[in-house]
Image (cartoon, rainbow, N blue to C red):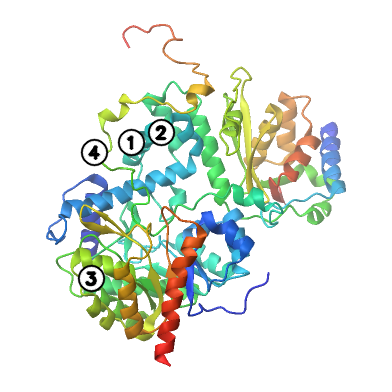
Amino acid sequence: MPALCNDLSSFARTIVHGEEPSSEIDTNYTNYSVAVAVGVYRNNYRGNLHDALAGAYPVIEQLVGKDFFRRMTRQFIGQHLSRSGNLHHYGAEMSGFVAEFKPAQDLVYLPDVAALEWACHCAYFADDAAALDLVKLAQIPPVQYSELILCTSPACHLVRSRFPIAAIWHAHQPGAPGDFHIDFDCGSCNALVCRKNDVVMVFELAEADAAWLQGIQAGISLGEATAATLERFPNFDLQAVLLNIVTQGVLVDFSMANH
Amino acid sequence: MNDQHTLISAAITSLLALGIGTSSGSAYATDHEKCFGIAKAGQNGCNSNKSKHSCAGHSKVDNDPNDFIVVPEGSCLKVGGKLESDEDKPATPGK
Amino acid sequence: MTMPANHTLPCTAGIGLRVPHYREVLENLPKLGWVEVHNENFFGGGAPLRTLLKVREHYPVSLHGVGMGLASASPLDQKHLSALHRLCEVVQPAAVSEHLCWNTAGEIVINDLLPFPYTQEALSHVAHRVEQVQEKLGRQLLVENLSSYLSFSHSEMSEGEFLSELTRRTGCGILFDVENLYVNMRNLGVNAEAFIRAIPAEAVKEYHLAGYSVRDGCLVDTHDHPVYPEVWELYEIALRHIGPRPTLIEWDSDIPALAILMDERAKAQQRLENCDACAV
């Protein structure tokens, strides 16, 4: 379909890159000029992507204000093409974009808040996963527990930051009181995103718990992750973190390490 | 190593004893309020100009230098934490 | 899960169900024939899917896609198709539809419904892709006519002729969007009656109705107004020539109170019933 390919590619460049419409596009319309028609498509293109970004990054939009956000997303849209027919996939690169984005550089926490929001967005639309099967787990002989590879839910994400991003996120949720106070001296934040009963939630994990979960997410065995964590954090409480994350639906399955 | 094994065994055993196994999805939220309250509007639609005021009157180029005469003026003004703003940093001549 | 026995769309009026009305519809279960939703908003699990399955317990559901890009100049997105297949498996929709449009050319994806030249080449291309979709889903796909703001000088046939030939080649059905046809009539000078004559009546399985906006003289398919009198008139003409079919009111921007949407629905329902009365 060479001719169709040429026609669509040319039309795409007209919409996305501002090229003149090709000679194959009719120029005479009774009620408007071809420039108006092209303008409608360009506006749709940018408008749909902007709305997708506003849907994924409501906290960023509140933080910088609607006008600034619109101008920021316009630059983002100019740099990042959509790659999917599903608009919910658009905007993954926002955190990196914001980090490089000069006009927002005073807001040092913004890239990490963007990363947290993308994690929440992905969690909201993630596939369902079955609950951790405790009957199956009970069949594993205790001597093999160290070799368990624990799998986390597709809706679970850990976002680590040196800024209080979970507090910032919570302060901007619907229904949150407007007169919040963010304590920037409280150090780093390990934000755990998970989905329980279909509601996306953000929790804070202690440094040791986050280090351990990061190991688990990387696919290393329960024994190795626990040993590595205990080395750095002698007071690490495995039982507490395990109960906590299973209650939150973070763990969904397991397998055995192959030796 | 033995200590660690005991620790892991105890943790898993307590998990099994409590019998908690939560679903990450299949249980319908009993609290409808909570569930619908946070419903995100789906972004995929078949209408034109969803964001109808989005680009009206804006230039056709994506990198308009005039865009950034504006400064952030949302709730970031309340968040604070301008830890690395220019005022806080020593002057860096030549940069 | 309990599913209503009815797996086909009833020949009544339904509404496009959007987030602002989920709660009210589920709590009050208003009397309406069926609902339609946009597929891509339910790819994945969680709250969107759970809510849709709740709705499905009470109403037949039509799945209406906006992102497949049937005419795109790129391989059919198999991930997208698989996601739709999975959704169909769990929702058991009464109808599945897509638009006669494209959204991808090589590396560029444009998340919009874009027109293309109606050529023999495009016809073969789209027919092949419709067949792939129908094969994967194991069911008939309804293909919707598009609202357009520009046209191509080398089209070899009208959109109506294109759709007619597409149904003949693939066995797909037609989702006749009356407002889209009206928009094209005003924007592009399309002959609406010729369109209605061109498409085979028995292939038409569903109607859409919506309101448009006018920008600089161009009618834009914004779905943010009530159905205009001229579009009701065209709907009545379609009902006379093609016959009554399940009819949807779409409202996607500046979404009004459910009661207003239900009033619009009642207007379509009234016309469907009048049409039935005439046919007897």
Query: Which residue lies at the image location 22% right of the left edge and 69% below the top edge?
Result: C185
Q: Amino acid at mark 3?
A: Tyr
Q: For residue C195, which quarter of the picture?
A: bottom left
Dot 1 alpha-carbon crowd within 10 angstroms: few under 14, some 14 to 19, many 20 or more? some
Q: Which residue is mark 1?
A: A75
Relative to residue C235, is residue C50 depicted above or below?
above
Relative to residue C129, is residue B75 depicted above or below?
above
Q: Which residue is mark 2?
A: A97
- In this picture, residue A99 sits left or right of residue B17: left
Measured in 3D between alpha carbons, the distance from the residue under mark 4 to the one under mark 1, in whole angstroms, is 12 Å
Looking at the rendering, in which quadrant would you find the N terminus of chain A?
A: bottom left
Q: Amino acid at mark 4?
A: Ser
Q: Chain of mark 3?
A: C
Residue C241 seen anywhere in this rendered image of the structure: yes
Q: Position of residue A128 (x, y in %)?
A: 62, 55
- Mark 2 in CB contact with mark 4 (< 8 angstroms): no
Name the element at disc 1. Answer: helix
Name the element at disc 4. Answer: loop
Q: Amino acid at mark 1?
A: Gln
Q: Chain of mark 4?
A: B
Q: Which residue is mark 3?
A: C118
Query: Which residue lies at the image location 47% right of the left edge and 16% below the top edge?
Result: B84
Measured in 3D between alpha carbons, the distance from the residue under mark 3 to the one under mark 4, in whole angstroms, is 32 Å
Measured in 3D between alpha carbons, the distance from the residue under mark 1 to the one under mark 2, in whole angstroms, is 9 Å
- Mark 3 in CB contact with mark 2 (< 8 angstroms): no
- Mark 1 in CB contact with mark 2 (< 8 angstroms): yes
Q: Which residue is mark 4?
A: B59
Dot 4 alpha-carbon crowd within 10 angstroms: few under 14, some 14 to 19, many 20 or more? few
Q: Amino acid at mark 2?
A: Phe
- In this picture, residue A237 sits left or right of residue A130: right
The residue closer to the viewer here, A14 or A180, is A180
